[in-house]
Amino acid sequence: MKALRRLFTVLLGVILLAVGALLILCVNNSGIRNFWMNNIDYIVNNFWVGTIAAIVLILLGVIAVVIGVHVKKVDPYTKVTMGEFGQVDISLSAIDAVVGKV
């Protein structure tokens, strides 16, 4: 799940960087602004293209919320020993497994 979260975070960051750069270009150049406004106008006025674009954006939003809200269950740990270089921890499920084998 960590890899999926990282991948989605990187993709979201790249998309936000691209949108920000595009906005800067649109503010400073009327030709680029007219091009993108015509494309947005086409998407909004065409029923199927607009519907598909909306569904894709909604799905990406739902995926982002699910990934962001999902909490991984963490096994409780206990400290086994403490030394000058750190500590040794073991999960309680590992202790249960060892006790079950004995």
Image: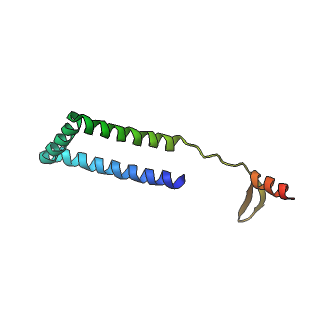
Check the image and name the residue furthest to the right.
102
Q: Which residue is depicted at the point 31% across and 39% down?
A: 52
The reply, left or right, for residue 27 in relation to residue 64 is left
Task: Report which quarter residue 81 is drawn in.
Answer: bottom right
Q: State the count of labels.
A: 0
The reply, left or right, for residue 49 in relation to residue 31 is right
* Percent coordinates x, y for residue 9 in the rendering: 44, 50
Observer-nearest of 44 and 91? 44
Observer-nearest of 4 and 76? 4
The quadrant of the rendering that contains the C terminus is: bottom right
Check the image and name the residue furthest to the left.
31
Observer-nearest of 82 and 26? 26
Task: Report which quarter residue 51 is drawn in.
Answer: top left
* Percent coordinates x, y for residue 10 in the rendering: 42, 53
- The image shows residue 37, relative to residue 90, as above or below, that is above
* Percent coordinates x, y for residue 68 in the rendering: 50, 43
The reply, left or right, for residue 47 in relation to residue 55 is left
The reply, left or right, for residue 27 in relation to residue 73 is left
Task: Report which quarter residue 63 is drawn in.
Answer: top left
Q: Which residue is depicted at the point 74% across and 56% down?
A: 90
Q: Which residue is depicted at the point 19% across and 42% down?
A: 39
Check the image and name the residue furthest to the bottom.
85
- Structure colour scheme: rainbow
* Percent coordinates x, y for residue 72 in the rendering: 60, 46
